Image (tube, coloured by chain):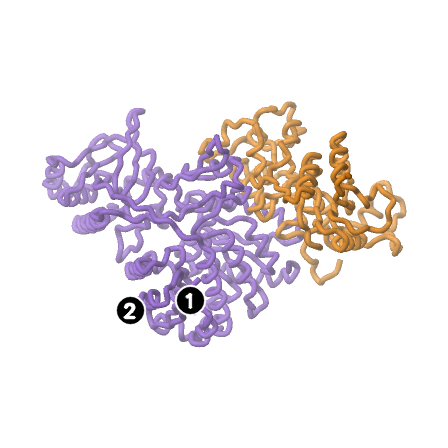
Amino acid sequence: MNIGLFISRANGAISQVIDLNDLAKEYRNLSVVKIYDNFFKASRDLIYQTRLNQLEGVVLAGDSKMFYQTNRSGSYLIRLFENAGINLNKIGFVNLKEQVAFPHRKERKSAYKKAKALINVALEKVKLSPLIEVLSVAPRRQIAILGTTVSGLLAAQRLLEKGYKVFLIDRGEKIRDLKEAKEKVLPTLSYIDGHKKVEYRLGVKVTDVSGYAGDYTIVLEKEGKQEELLVGGIILALDTDEDASWFEELHQFMHLQMSDDGFFSPLDAETLPVQTIDEGICLVFQGGSQSLRELALRADSAALSLGNLLDHNEIIHEVTISRVDEKVCGGCGVCVKTCMFKASSIDLVEKHSHIDPRRCIGCGNCVAACPTGARDLLSFPSEFIFKAIDILSQYESPNGIKVLTLVCDGCGYEALDYAGKMGLEYSPSILPLEVHCAGRIDTQFILYAFVRGFDGVMICECVEGRCRNLVGNIDLDRRANLFRDVLRSRQINPERLRILGLTPCEGVTCVNVVAEFINELKKLGGESSG
Amino acid sequence: MAKKKVTVATASLQSCFGCHISFLDLHEEVLGVFDLIEILHSPIMDVKEVPQVTVGLIEGAVANENNLRVIEEFRKKAKIILAMGSCANLGGVPGMRNFFYQEDVLKRAYVETESTVKGKIPTSNQIPKLLDEVKPVHKVIKVDYYIPGCPPLPEMIKDAIIALVQGKEPEWPTYNLCKECKRYHTLMYIPQREFLTETVFSPMELEQIDTEKCFLEQGVLCMGPATRAGCHTRCINGNIPCRGCFGPTPDALEQGSKMINALSSILPAGTLMHLEDVVGVGYRYSLPVSIYPKVSPPKGGKK
């Protein structure tokens, strides 16, 4: 397989700590290895190299993986690679900046070794991940707006002007009281009222949302009657002062990142304040001390964002979901009970399980739960995780202690990034391995880590109620608690398994716990060495 | 002239002879098998040397130095090694010794048993030494084919032998036991995040177990989901939950942790925590093939 390794100096932040020239030399057997000051200025050359060397996979060693998700220049770069023929699953990320160079500034030797181990892991991910399928969806030119708040109405008006059909949905029987904004928003309201392409659904309960950008199904309930709305995009125009309970309800089937205050959080509060990880869902919350002008600007932003998306003739949707090996699945139904999103069902004739791609969000909880191993997650295949544990176990730690840190990319990964950005230093004994969600952690991984000689395993999961996959953290806790007995049975002190609940900004907590855990492991000594 | 028969030697390592008995449980059908094969060496025959044979049929786990000697000789003398039963394939029940340090095992057996007075651990070199770790046969020598089960069904042994005689490979199902199981479900297939029952029972705690309903739905631990099929649910037909003797499916690395992963989302986790021996449930037959097949080396290397 032709794999290219591209290394970024991150404008010096990484090259100050790690000798990248030496590092690059270790990968001469790859199709291409190149070092850049900064990927985002070099996108042309990156794509040129990709095409020239007919690459099938690339590894980007530099910034945090999060940067490519939450920053437009990052996601644009990924889009360019995809256009150049690289499957999304064949792009590997190595976080050399936030998770190696920043926290290990003073331990250059270890930083170098850790960088190498992490690059090896990413290369393996590119090799072992299956190609992700893409689905093409013709987007519906209909948008649902939840909440008849001022911001909701402003967004509705803009979308109607753009020619979209709009459903205005609210729990109350009437359009909300616009309060002090009433006088100014009244013309907007009469514009909407008189428009042919608007429909109201008031006094309804939203009972389900499924699908993806361009093609959602929203189920509404009123007086025992159900209605299905088919829309291309959704705007959440909730009031953060009045709608706390509605947020909780919606969180049951809208799987967006939650912020610390219990509301959905945007991709980036400053630069992408209305966009979410789901392209087709925008946030125009009101509440607190926002001025009418701010609300109007948000409405503009949401209308622009959804308008741009749904103006396309087709939207490409990547299916990152789990898959079933039908030769091994016997249809026991554990996945049906595990799935929070009703994506699993059993084919009663063939007696094996089936996955609904419209509902599966690829959290991986069923993969961990499946007692036969018939399920696998396309974006984080089990084979890769075992291999990654293998590779990381070969790292030589300066203090002799190695801790495998399985991080959920919704909290632990970001917390480690945050710690790095804050300039906090921690021991290079910590070897992070991203696993997408705590619910994807199969206890087999933990056992494997111990047999491969790790002194401890730390798992960073989201704090209660904050898992975007709803129950990943709860299920991990249950599994891990039962699993401690298995560790005891092998005479491994269960204290060697540490589970840490985190929010993305708890870098300090994370670093403190890491230090404490390593001290405890030192005291426990080498009683477990596989 | 009668066709030349395929020559077979059998051995029993650390085991209960159950697989040999299961073979004899073919009853009159065993005569048909003997038309095809000739057994030249077996623990129930008085033949000291293992002759050159085509098939070496091995029952039992490798647990002491004599077992090692036997299988090494079998590997030299037999063209095809067929590992028979859970002990040979998974380590089986004798494999549970791997939960303990050898010193503790010997002390328990020879000194601490309730009926022992002034016991001592034998030191004679006439007795083969225990190995530190019980292993399945394939971890010591190359095994060509295997028959799962504790014991394997008589027909499975017959089928495997006939397949080999005909130059074919014995094949076994890869899916889990639930596919073979005929019991009905009411809750298991309903996509609702609720535990199946309020509590977990051991089979003897229940006055009655529904003979047609899934065990898990009655709060009884059944290893079926984490166990490969092939036994035609013989225990389940007798209203006894599966104990996992066929071992993990080919896609799972081991049974114990996989079963814990699964149970955590279907039965009340709080009650499971108070189970006497959740480890024993998961690893009854398969500890020696687990990812972590024995106790970790003790601190300081002693014991």
2 and 1 marks in contact (CB < 8 Å): no
Image x and y of residue B182, in percent: 57, 28
**Distance between the Cα atoms at labels 2 and 1?**
18 Å
Label 1 resides on the chain identified as A
Q: Is residue A150 left or right of residue B47?
A: left
Image x and y of residue B212, in percent: 58, 24
The disc, 2 or 1, on the residue closer to the chain's N-terminal end is 2
**Could you classify mark 2 by the number of other residues whose Cα lies within 10 Å: few (under 14), some (14-19), or many (20 or more)?**
few
Q: Nearer the viewer, mark 2 or mark 1?
A: 2
Placement of the N terminus of chain B among the 4 image quadrants:
top right
Residue at the location (21% across, 40% down)? A142
**Could you classify mark 1 by the number of other residues whose Cα lies within 10 Å: few (under 14), some (14-19), or many (20 or more)?**
many
Same subunit under labels 2 and 1?
yes
Residue A340, can we see it?
no
Label 2 resides on the chain identified as A
Chain seen in purple: A
Question: In this orientation, which residue lies closer to the viewer: B198 or A65?
Answer: A65
Question: In this orientation, which residue lies closer to the viewer: A172 or B102?
Answer: B102
Give the label on residue A41, or none.
2
Chain seen in orange: B
Give the label on residue A96, or none.
1
Q: Amino acid at mark 2?
A: Lys
Q: Is residue B194 left or right of residue A156?
A: right
Q: Amino acid at mark 1?
A: Leu
State the image quarter where residue B258 is shown. Answer: top right
**Callout 1: helix, strand or loop?**
loop
Image x and y of residue A365, in percent: 47, 44
